[in-house]
Amino acid sequence: MSVLRRMMRVSNRSLLAFIFFFSLSSSCLYFIYVAPGIANTYLFMVQARGIMLRENVKTIGHMIRLYTNKNTTLNGTDYPEGNNSSDYLVQTTTFLPENFTYSPYLPCPEKLPYMRGFLNVNVSEVSFHEIRQLFSKDLDIEPGGHWRPKDCKPRWKVAVLIPFRNRHEHLPIFFLHLIPMLQKQRLEFAFYVIEQTGTQPFNRAMLFNVGFKEAMKDSVWDCVIFHDVDHLPENDRNYYGCGEMPRHFAAKLDKYMYILPYKEFFGGVSGLTVEQFRKINGFPNAFWGWGGEDDDLWNRVHYAGYNVTRPEGDLGKYKSIPHHHRGEVQFLGRYKLLRYSKERQYIDGLNNLIYTPKILVDRLYTNISVNLMPELAPIQEGP
């Protein structure tokens, strides 16, 4: 009888152990395949805490060095040796005064008096009807959301590309914030929403490639902004023009506690000139699902001899619009692809993309619908 009881106790323990490990593995699979955004957000938050701690220690050490060296002089001038104190000093503003006079024959300045800095970001839902009503009063906005300043020559002609699937509540909030900001920056701009149809996992990178090709057919642009629909800038001095180097605009996201998750992070909002984007052969097309395509873009940029620039201080702050739906599935093959970024750069990108778009021009944007499949980006293997 005692032997039977011992056998039953062992069986019960085995059953409990099985239930525990089954529950644990089910939870892991849920976060990998069903709700990857939640898991990755918490992962980045943990990383951000570590970064904050390290940065605070460095800052405290720096301030101690400044204090101990404050009486060190060189030719009668305060000179804290080995320190670049400019990062810790208040920078004098170089933005133009209110009475600045524009000229329709001269390029628009990059630092205009209308650019006040902090923006009041409101992520409350608003209908497209309300947004269309609001912007219908601005007769200078042409179909497709195309706008250009009249009081000066735009320094950049900017195509804003937005990858899209089932985020209809986000679009009107996005336009409500972006249109006034870009107008204040005196940029010529238009919006292209590239919508993925069909049942394949979301391919953000391929959508950007499609949007780039269609935007180039539509008008003569010289700067392209690759913009997630749920990211809203918190500072209108974050200038949406391009430069000699590719630009990462969204350096500080609220969902990552306004800390750059890692040095090579290139997600959210980035910008390249048309020439730069063509030189790197665009985004990779092989990333299906969540993650990896921005890291691959970072690699492409560096393999092409570029560096990435970011806004200084708080200029690169962004607020994320809350999601009311399930996130995209993880792309588990991204690490293998990233190991071969250099080999794949010129065989997978703009040059191997085949697609058939459906285009609808709205008052505020051009909608490009496309059903993406892996066979639309065949890779020609070398001899």
Image (cartoon, rainbow, N blue to C red):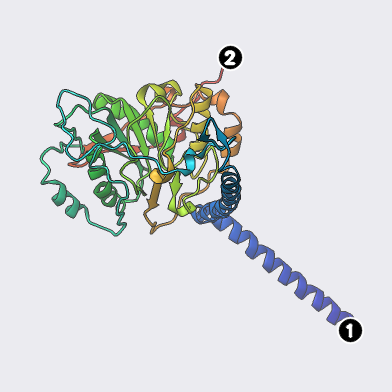
**Given the current orientation, which residue lies at the most extreme bottom position?**
1
Q: Residue at x 24, y 27 (%)?
A: 218
**Which of the pair 157/280 is nearer the observer?**
157
**Given the current orientation, which residue lies at the most extreme top position?**
383
Q: Amino acid at mark 2?
A: Pro
Whether residue 169 is situated above or below residue 264 in the rendered picture: below
Quarter where residue 95 is shown: top left
Q: Amino acid at mark 1?
A: Ser
Q: Residue at x 36, y 26 (%)?
A: 273
**Which of the pair 59/219 is nearer the observer?**
59
Task: Say which quadrant the N terminus sits in.
Answer: bottom right
Q: Residue at x 41, y 38 (%)?
A: 311
The image's mark for residue 374 is none
Task: Say which quadrant the C terminus sits in.
Answer: top right
Asked if one can make out residue 200 in the rendered structure from this viewpoint, the answer is: no
The number of numbered discs placed on residues in the rendered structure image is: 2
Q: Residue at x 51, y 54 (%)?
A: 41
Find disc 1 in the rendering and name its residue. Answer: 2
Q: Nearer the viewer, mark 2 or mark 1?
A: 2
Find disc 2 in the rendering and name its residue. Answer: 383
Position in image of residue 12 (x %, y %): 76, 75
Position in image of residue 3 (x %, y %): 89, 80
